[in-house]
Amino acid sequence: METEGLELRAIRDITKTKEQEEKLRKYSILEAKSKEMEQFTYIASHDLRHPLQTILSYIKVFDKDYAKKLDEDGQMCLHLISEAATRMDKLVLGLLDYSRLSKIKQLETVNCNDIIHAVLDDLNLAIQATDATITVNNMPTLSAYPLELRQLFQNLISNALKFKRNNIRPEINISAKQDKTGYTFEFHDNGIGIEEKDREKIFQIFQRLHTHEEYEGLGLGLAYCKKIVELHNGQIWVRSKPGEGSTFYFTINT
Ligand code: ADP
């Protein structure tokens, strides 16, 4: 502002505002890309299932009507084709479920103790088969997505049962504690453990450390867990001693 040779200037440092604007711009690009990716995963997995279902039903027809006419090698090939197609169908279905996870409904008040005990009932056969001991302490009642939380608990407990050490009875301790922002849960087991270099990779989709002949599975369980925890504004991580056991931690900040 200039008056009679006098000049008045107002200077304001807007670096921070500009930096924040830039951060927001990058964030919304990332968010749009992630939505696009989710939509792509949904459409791809949904559409891939149709031809797969056709393959699977013709394998059944072929098996029923023509398998007798094949020699032993031919029958073995048919069996392997059928197994691979069934596994692929499970993977595609898993991917479809994974992409559906973000289409979230309403937060509800959830009693974690009830959920854990429902999961333990469901896993009763595996618990008995492995002679596992499971202790549950201080489960809170909190605001969460009940079905997703149940799946999270189920994946962690069934992994703790599955990745047990040979001839060692699984011991699993589950607990939670409240802090300023929410809750931290711990799922501790005395299983085979996880090497340091693999502790981040295991949360990525389809990442497995073993063949499915060694341990049955699709490599989806922990990717689901990560996505479910993130839907609850939380984080998931693991600490482990290979050959001694692992503890999975996650936070819920709803
Ligand atoms: P899956 O169980 O189908 O292999 P997950 O995504 O649940 O898939 O787990 C990925 C990998 O992480 C597993 O293949 C296994 O190597 C490792 N893992 C998961 N949970 C445990 C655990 N409690 N103890 C040892 N290793 C584990």
Image (spheres, grey):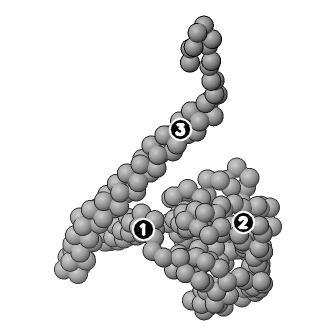
Q: Nearer the viewer, residue 214 or 29?
A: 29
Mark 3 and mark 2 residues within 8 Å of each other at the beta carbon: no
Quarter of the picture containing the N terminus is: top right
Q: Which residue is mark 3?
A: 21
Q: Which residue is mark 2?
A: 181
Which quarter of the figure has residue 92? bottom left
Which quarter of the figure has residue 72? bottom left
Observer able to see residue 24? yes
Q: Amino acid at mark 3?
A: Glu
Q: Is residue 160 above or below residue 209?
A: below
Residue 221 is left or right of residue 12, and the answer is: left
Q: How far apart are the alpha carbons under marks 3 and 2?
A: 27 Å
Kindly identify the residue that appears in the image at 63 percent across and 34 percent down.
Answer: 16
Q: Amino acid at mark 2?
A: Thr
- Residue 210: x and y, percent? 59, 61
Q: Residues within 10 Å of mark 2 (few under 14, many from 20)?
A: few
- Residue 165: x and y, percent? 73, 72
Mark with earlier residue (3, 2): 3
Q: Amino acid at mark 1?
A: Lys
Q: Secondary structure at mark 1?
A: loop
Residue 198 is left or right of residue 138, and the answer is: left
- Residue 4: x and y, percent? 58, 9
Q: Which residue is mark 1?
A: 103
- Asked whether mark 3 lies closer than 8 Å to ligand 1, one says no
Q: Residues within 10 Å of mark 1 (few under 14, many from 20)?
A: few
- Residue 25: x and y, percent? 48, 40
